[in-house]
Amino acid sequence: MVDLKRKRGRKPKNAVADSPSGGAEVDTATPVETSTNGAAAADTQTHRRLRGRPRKAESEQQERDNIATSPERRGHRDVTEPHHLRHVAELSAAAKATPSMDAVVKVFCVHTEPNFSLPWQRKRQYSSSSSGFVIGGRRVLTNAHSVEHHTQVKLKKRGSDTKYLATVLSIGTECDIAMLTVNDDEFWEGVSPLEFGDLPALQDAVTVVGYPIGGDTISVTSGVVSRIEILSYVHVSTELLGLQIDAAINSGNSGGPAFNDKGKCVGIAFQSLKHEDAENIGYVIPTPVIMHFIQDYEKNGAYTGFPIIGIEWQKMENPDLRLSMGMAHNQKGVRIRRVEPTAPESNVLKPSDVILSFDGVDIANDGTVPFRHGERIGFSYLVSQKYTGDDARVKVLRKSKILEFKIKLNAHKRLIPAHIKGKPPSYYIVGGFVFSAVSVPYLRSEYGKDYEFDAPVKLLDKLLHAMAQSIDEQLVVVSQVLVADINIGYEELVNTQVLAFNGKPVKNLKSLANMVEACKEEYLKFDLDYNQIVVLQTKSAKAATSDILAMHCIPSAMSDDLKT
């Protein structure tokens, strides 16, 4: 009885000191057995003394121990700083950080997405809300996916009931950042732009501010930086530097700033991990990526993107592999598997070259480079710090000889692009056959968010492994067949690649449309994947096209970009 009463009251100080976290509470619902170690036989006077005021010598010694071991007090010169002065300092620091929230705005957007299944029209419009924040130069930053396919964008300041029309200045699809501005001078009154801080370290505190679902007012969530590495940006599947935090990032938080403990912006909230085995995992776009986007816009007047090295590479961790490549014991690097034909470096780099360094930074056998003290990161981080058109020095090992090349960095040209940059999809129709160019948004529209599992295997193989042989190459498919008498027997053709027309390879959708329109032969013959062919009489097919367009209320047989 005595022990239980004592546990319900004030805990002994040594219970907290034994906790690994330094502040965990002891579970009072579980009785602590003390009889086996003799604690139950302790003198009752000792218990009474512990409940009362400690002796002066013990109190002074304990205070000195707390000061010596407390991480908050380490490095402080005046360990006897009065409590009221510390309280004033805390209030002063809080007052400095509070105005930063006034720069956080709510973004309202009306989207009108393309309809890839019926590319001559758009889908029904819908509305969304997200977050953003004010930076210098009368500009606002938010996420690219927050204003993608926008029809109208409005901004509302904290504590205001007025929505201001905004103009989209630039959209960075790879980094998922968009830049806006507002022409109304009233919007900028009383708003101070946020200042950017340095890249935080692991375990640094961060605070995410925004307007997530669950309410209309501003929301604040706190956490720490739990990981810094190259992340996959879901918006367009690119890989850039990112921060993982344990603060909750919900729908509507996108585009909101992440603050450090000094009130400076260290990132933009943009995605979270939803998994049954994971909780409170959010991701933040860090300041190096943000500054790259801003400086790219200021330098070129538009967003030009993040450059890449157009290669596929292999790790060199196996010692026998390194010996077979002629590498010395002190040499490290990665082996080039393939070089993209459209990349500028295809003129100098070759398969089986071993990249030893990039811009003077040595690359390890696992493809990483030194990042910060005790940290390493993928060498693609060095490439992402460059701008499109910049030069870089690459040292390679080729047939046991060290060579150094100067290469020009450029944006990535994919056979199946990750986005269409806000443009309407291209299409061409003849004889009821709808031809389209494949892109990732096209696959997502046709097969849903799990297109990587549900799309045809051959299209996925082209998406993951195929390389464009020229800048203007596209993957053209028969998207669907609008049923008519002219195309009887072909109704089930869906998303099948077109390889050739009348014996000539199909380079892109525009070349196919030009060849069909200029065809004077008796038949239109399309060679498709899976050894299929489509044959139509030229005159009959072209004559039937106009009737099919009228039946389906299609304004034109081809998209506007194919007419020029």
Image (cartoon, rainbow, N blue to C red):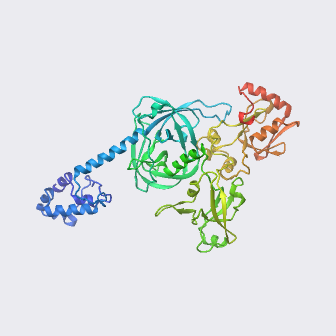
Residue 48 quadrant: bottom left
> Which residue corresponds to the image point at 70% horizontal and 37% vertical from the top-left?
426
> Which residue corresponds to the image point at 22% horizontal and 63% vertical from the top-left?
64
> Which residue corresponds to the image point at 78% horizontal and 27% vertical from the top-left?
546
Q: Position of residue 262 (x, y in %)?
A: 38, 49
Q: Position of residue 112 (x, y in %)?
A: 59, 32
Q: Nearer the viewer, residue 323 or 369?
A: 369
Q: Position of residue 447 (x, y in %)?
A: 63, 41
Describe residue 94's horizontal placement relative to residue 185 as left or right.
Answer: left
Q: Position of residue 157 (x, y in %)?
A: 43, 34
Q: Quadrant of the N terminus?
A: bottom left
**Residue 434 visible, this orientation:** no
Residue 448 quadrant: top right
Residue 162 quadrant: top left
How many circles with numbers are drawn on the protein? 0
Name the outermost residue toward the bottom: 329
Describe residue 335's horizontal placement relative to residue 60 as left or right.
Answer: right
Describe residue 120's horizontal placement relative to residue 280 as left or right.
Answer: right
Q: Is residue 488 above or below residue 274?
A: above
> Which residue corresponds to the image point at 21% horizontal and 60% vertical from the top-left?
63
Q: Quadrant of the C terminus?
A: top right
Q: Nearer the viewer, residue 69 or 501?
A: 69
**Residue 548 visible, this orientation:** yes
Describe residue 225's horizontal placement relative to residue 120 as left or right.
Answer: left
Q: Is residue 289 above or below residue 214?
A: below
